[in-house]
Image (spheres, helix red, strand yellow):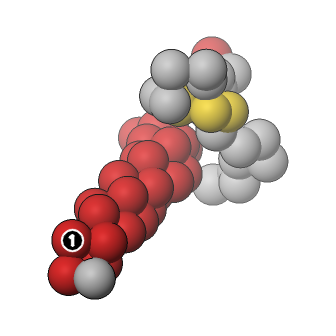
Amino acid sequence: MKKLTSSPIELEDGSYKFTISENDGESIDNCEIALLKTAFPAIREAISRHLEAVSKKKS
């Protein structure tokens, strides 16, 4: 299995984009890696915003 070397890009609206090659798109493992690499920063940012809001609310 070939490792993907690119990273997701955050767009102006806060969403993320990750473009993979046609060859990577034909590999379930590489598609899964791309999905996880893209979802992780989005989920982490959402949790961070939530915890910051909760922290401010308790102050």
Indicate the position of residue 1 as horizontal and vertical percent values: 63, 54
Indicate the position of residue 20 as horizontal and vertical percent values: 64, 26
The reply, left or right, for residue 50 in relation to residue 39 is left
Look at 77% across and 41% down and name the residue there. Answer: 6
The reply, left or right, for residue 22 in relation to residue 41 is right
Q: As shown in the figure, which amino acid type bears the numbered disc 1?
A: Lys
Look at 71% across and 43% down and name the residue there. Answer: 7
Q: In which quarter of the image is residue 49?
A: bottom left
Look at 28% across and 82% down and name the residue there. Answer: 59
Is there any visible trace of residue 43 in the rendered image?
Answer: no
Q: Nearer the viewer, residue 58 or 15?
A: 58
Q: In which quarter of the image is residue 40?
A: bottom left
The reply, left or right, for residue 6 in relation to residue 23 is right
Number of numbered callouts drawn: 1
Disc 1 crowd, CA 10 A, few/some/many (<14, 14-19, 20+): few
Q: In which quarter of the image is residue 30?
A: top right
Q: Nearer the viewer, residue 13 or 25?
A: 13
Residue that mark 1 sits on: 57
Q: Which of 47 and 5 is in front in this view?
A: 47
Look at 51% across and 20% down and name the residue there. Answer: 13
Q: In this view, does 41 lie above or below 55?
A: above
Is there any visible trace of residue 50 in the rendered image?
Answer: yes
Indicate the position of residue 33 as horizontal and vertical percent values: 51, 51
Indicate the position of residue 23 as horizontal and vertical percent values: 64, 24
Q: Is mark 1 on a helix, strand or loop?
A: helix
Q: Nearer the viewer, residue 16 or 3?
A: 16
Q: Is residue 25 above or below residue 42?
A: above
